[in-house]
Image (cartoon, grey):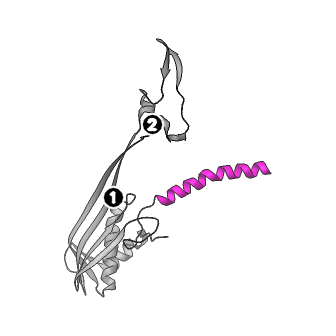
């Protein structure tokens, strides 16, 4: 029985670690910008005139461009209805990618923490075609010498200037019925947990 308990604990540990890692790596939910939570980003707006707003949605590195654009549309529709209007027209609209590349280097080499902590292959003499010689796992081997990590991360920010109106929607392809936008996109909106 003790052995079974130890086995179940041992198999639960990697699952728990995986769950914690995936919880940290989540796309931006539909939330106000600056909300403290699991994911950064969110929506913001600025009133320009009584019926004109600048609306934006900023996603984090795990948020797709489509999701950022959908959340921007949803926020514009929600804001339109909250202000007592029926439709909105996007006067200006842009989606800007924010690409960041980071390069990190293992500065400790064989003397500090590596991919396995402080454990690693040891130096030793080995016999090769030219006799006995010193062998260093971090020197000359392409596997051990790769101590540079290059990461490129892209996040998106969508911004629109909208003009709100009452009554029927204007005959303009840039105009949207706020209720229809909320009905059609409502099922794709993920709120923070």
Mark 2 is surrounded, within 10 Å at the Cα level, by few (under 14), some (14 to 19) or many (20 or more) other residues, namely some
Is disc 1 in contact with disc 2, using a CB cutoff of under 8 Å?
no
Q: Is residue 68 magenta?
A: no
Which residue is under mark 2? 109
- Residue 27 lies left or right of residue 165; in this view the side is right
Which of the two discs, 1 and 2, sits closer to the camera? 2
- The residue shown at (54%, 31%) is 121
- The answer to whether 11 appears left or right of 115 in the picture is right
Q: Is residue 26 magenta?
A: yes
Q: CA distance from mark 1 to mark 2?
A: 32 Å
* Foreground residue among 108 and 169: 108
**For the stretch drawn in magenta, what is the main secondary structure?**
helix
Instruction: Find the magenta span and give its range.
Output: 1-28
Return the mark for residue 155.
Answer: 1
> Residue 57 location, x and y as percent?
32, 69
Give the image location of residue 64, x and y in percent: 36, 59
Residue 130 visible in this rendered orientation of the protein: yes
- Closer to us: 129 or 72: 129
| SS class, disc 2 | helix
Does residue 167 appear left or right of residue 38 in this picture? left
Name which residue lies at 45% across and 30% down: 138
The picture places residue 56, in percent across and down from the top left corner, at 29, 71
């Amino acid at each position: 029985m003790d052995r079974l308990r130890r086995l179940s604990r041992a198999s639960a540990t990697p699952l728990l670690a995986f769950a914690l890692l995936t919880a940290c790596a989540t796309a931006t939910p539909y939330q106000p910008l600056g909300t403290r939570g699991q994911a950064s980003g969110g929506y913001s707006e600025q009133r320009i005139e009584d019926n004109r707003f600048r609306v934006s949605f900023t996603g984090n590195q795990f948020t797709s461009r489509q999701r950022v654009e959908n959340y921007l549309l949803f926020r514009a529709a929600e804001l339109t209805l909250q202000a007592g209007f029926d439709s909105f027209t996007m006067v200006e609209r842009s989606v800007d990618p924010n690409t960041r590349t980071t390069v990190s280097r293992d500065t400790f080499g064989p003397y500090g923490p590596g991919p396995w902590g402080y454990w690693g292959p040891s130096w030793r003499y080995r016999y090769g075609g030219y006799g006995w010689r010193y062998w260093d796992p971090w020197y000359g081997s392409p596997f051990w010498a790769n101590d540079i990590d290059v990461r490129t991360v892209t996040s998106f920010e969508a911004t629109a200037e909208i003009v709100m109106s009452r009554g029927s929607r204007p005959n303009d392809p840039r105009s949207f019925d706020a209720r229809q936008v909320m009905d059609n996109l409502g099922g794709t909106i993920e709120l923070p947990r």
